[in-house]
Image (tube, rainbow, N blue to C red):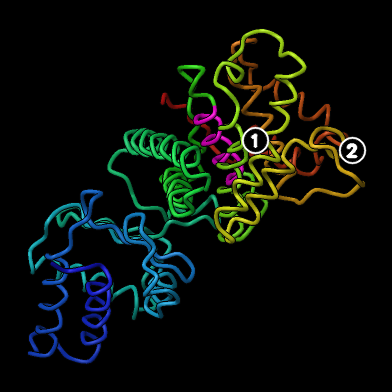
Amino acid sequence: MSDPVRFLNAFAQALGVMTLYPEGHPSRERAVDIAFGELEGITDPGGHPTFTFLDDEVVFGRERLRELKSWDWGRRLVAAGIQRLEFERKVSRDEFDGFLHEVLGRLVLSSVDTGEARQMRSLGIRFGAVGMEGHDRTDALEPASAAVTLELALGEEADTFRWMQGRVRSQGSVPFLEAEAVVRSLSVAMHGDSRMVLPLLKLKEFDQYTTTHSLNVAVLSMGLAESLGCSAVEVRAIGVAGLLHDIGKIRIPIEVLTKPGRLTDEERELMNRHPVDGARIIMQSDEDLGTAAIVAYEHHIMLNGGGYPRLHYGRECTMASRLVHVCDVYDALSTTRPYRDAWPSDKTMAYLAERAGTEFDPDLVAAFIRTLREGEAQVRVLTD
């Protein structure tokens, strides 16, 4: 049985050898044979081998390959517009050789357009970028059917987030890799078209509100961050923060979360503790989640210092917190709750505009409204 690290090293070795020897040379053919043999031996619990290259990290499925941290070939692939390799089915040796030729072309030919995703449909191999750097790019893995891909992605990620909530309840810590995996999948769903798409889940049952709301806030936050020109790293960090902003609500009984009437003073106090609880949970989980912890703590604090938790001294919240606050309120008001109907989008945006400068950062509200109302992003509402 092979393992993903051995395969990637053999894969890189084959690409290197292919630049040195012509087709048919024994050294070249032997390197391709070794890489193909390693690929055949890989078993992936997710169904088919998928590799994602992000900054200095390499991820196999949802497992971070720590042996390949700061892997030079990972950076080369990302620079060539290849952030993901996905083998959808078992391929032949000839098919694998053809795939290597395609990848090599991206690596060594300056004429290759690395902004275009590639899908070798006949080979069952997909590769391309999981880009977050511009809504006018088409550098996500090209889907066979955009609608089907969106529904599949959000259905799977909703299940993953529910699993994460259970993990937090049982172990008291956030599984960092799973949180990043959810955000990566949302990013792919957002970039499967010629312009940015904001795939939002429509609530079916009130007891699933936290799951639906968290995924929606992650999507809206990434869309807004991207429209502001944030870097790919910043967009992903804000996406994780949006996903986890309400994680402290796992400590609130479901009957309080779904109560149709007015909360008692005790219930309101319990509800208002979720930012502090969420920040503590995240801080105990992973040092890479500093932004998420700050956002969890600050996302209910208003621009003028109101809201909760109360600050002991006046200060400005971080940009990420102010951004997630806008997206949080928009989705909350746009969703049917046990105690009120959903607001239409125009009414919700008017509310944001009215409170810009007091509760919300006016620049962020203006950018958010521009993104949704003026066509910078397309909104698709899906059913979870």
Q: Residue furthest top?
A: 261
Residue at 75% in and 25% down: 269
Query: Circle 2 — which element?
Result: loop
Does 14 appear above or below 279? below
The C terminus lies in which quarter of the figure?
Answer: top left
Residue 142 belongs to the span the image colors magenta: no
Q: Is residue 266 left or right of residue 259?
A: right
The prevailing secondary structure element of the residues shown in magenta is: helix
The image quadrant that residue 52 belongs to is bottom left
**How packed is label 2: few (under 14 Cα within 10 Å), some, or many (20 or more)?**
some
What residue is pinned by disc 1? 374
* Residue at 45 percent of width and 38 percent of height: 161
Q: Residues within 10 Å of mark 1 (few under 14, many from 20)?
A: few
Type of the residue with mark 1: Glu
Whether residue 61 sits left or right of residue 254 in the image: it is left
Question: Residue 246 location, x and y as percent?
Answer: 61, 36
- The amino acid beneath tag 2 is Asn
Say which quarter of the image contains residue 236.
Answer: bottom right
In the image, residue 268 lies at what x, y percent? 73, 21
Position above or below: 244 against 34: above
Q: Which residues are magenta?
A: 210-223
User: Dots 1 and 2: beta carbons under 8 Å?
Assistant: no
What is the x, y in percent for residue 281? 60, 46
> Which residue lies at the image location 35% right of the left edge and 60% below the top edge?
128
Q: Which residue shows up at 15% across the image and 89% down it?
A: 22
Of labels 1 and 2, earlier in sequence is 2
Question: Considering depth in this image, is 251 or 39 the residue closer to the camera?
Answer: 251
Q: Is residue 57 left or right of residue 300?
A: left
- The label nearer to you, 1 versus 2, is 2
Does the magenta run of residues contain 218? yes
The numbered disc on residue 304 is 2
